[in-house]
Amino acid sequence: MPSPAPLQSSYSQSSSGTTETPNWLATGHCITDAGSFTSAAVDLDQPRQGITLAGKAASSACSLLGLDLRSDCRLADHWLRGDDVTAVYETDDARHLRTTAMWRLHPSGDATRAWELIASAQTSLLQSDALLAVVSEIEATDVLWGTCEDGTVRWHAGESSDATCVLLGRSRATGSGDTSVLVAAHPGDARRMTVRRDGTRVVVECWLFSTELEKGVLLRSRVLAAVGRTADATRWAGDLAAKFAASPPMLTT
């Protein structure tokens, strides 16, 4: 696989030690979404946290689109370009996985902010286990499950094995304002989605790459997350999830 573009060609360096693109501001390995209406940042040294959204209280902070590699890992490379924050991780286990996480801004409405994690994996072994999860943890008061039917998302209060997205409601009591969070797996990519409660927090896991990975093969998948107003959440979340589900699956090699 070709080596990524040199770091210095991907963004500009300022005299203050920060780097920036039109959409991202970086200080060291901490990358901030400068255009977001809610505080959002990626710490590249903590891939499982993904995009962290700060709340008024520490308990109300949530993490979206974190990468759980099921192992300790090291940050092998990283760069910024346009809408993308890209990091390459190598696992510290017998699987010898090299995983690329690309956190990308996703088009959305004025009152909504959306991001997409494009994850890819390859190995230097003849065969390896590539199973990993994209994890989001949200302080939430309620959960709706979404199934896509004829290009439209239908919301259900009960758990559904056919669901490809969930909508998590948050209230002012949590210090998060009246906002909701959408997490959506692409139906052509995801293997399974699980949702569980951990106290007052809801943990959403989108499991990817359950098949064996062979040397020379690149697996690729993606998951969407968005935050917006609770008042019309089923509308904007349904529109985003339906358009995401209708986009063609990503090619693998």
Image (spheres, helix red, strand yellow):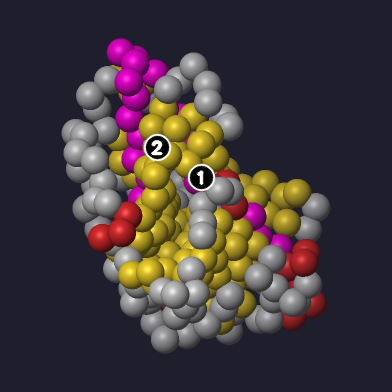
Q: Is residue 139 found inside the magenta-colored segment of the image?
A: yes
Seen from the viewer's position, the closer of residues 210 and 68 is 68
Amino acid under label 1? Leu
Seen from the viewer's position, the closer of residues 154 and 117 is 117
* Residue that extends furthest to the top in the rendered view of this protein: 126
Question: Label 2 belongs to which residue?
Answer: 99
Task: Assess whether mark 1 and mark 2 are in contact (beta carbons under 8 angstroms).
Answer: yes
Determine whether the residue tagged by mark 1 lies in a helix, strand or loop.
Answer: strand
With 96 as the anchor, is 245 left or right in this view? left
Taking the spot 34% from the left edge, 77% from the top edge, the residue there is: 22
Q: Which mark is residue 232?
A: none
Determine whether the residue tagged by mark 2 lies in a helix, strand or loop.
Answer: strand
Spatial distance from mark 2 to mark 1, Cα to Cα? 9 Å
Q: Which mark is residue 67?
A: 1
* Residue that extends furthest to the front in the rendered view of this protein: 15
**Among numbered discs 2 and 1, the one appearing first in the sequence:** 1
Taking the spot 73% from the left edge, 68% from the top edge, the residue there is: 60
Percent coordinates x, y for residue 94 in the rendering: 49, 17
- Residue 23, above or below 7: below
With 211 as the anchor, is 132 left or right in this view? right
Amino acid under label 2? Thr
Quarter of the rendering occupied by the C terminus: top left
Check disc 1: other Cα within 10 Å, few if <14, some if 14-19, many if 20+.
Answer: many
Taking the spot 41% from the left edge, 28% from the top edge, the residue there is: 97
Percent coordinates x, y for residue 124 in the rendering: 32, 20
- Residue 35, above or below 20: below
Q: Is residue 13 visible?
A: yes
Quarter of the rendering occupied by the N terminus: top left
Task: Give the extent of the magenta segment.
Answer: 118-143
Nearer the observer: mark 2 or 1; the answer is: 2
Q: Is residue 135 visible?
A: no
Q: Main secondary structure of the magenta part?
A: strand
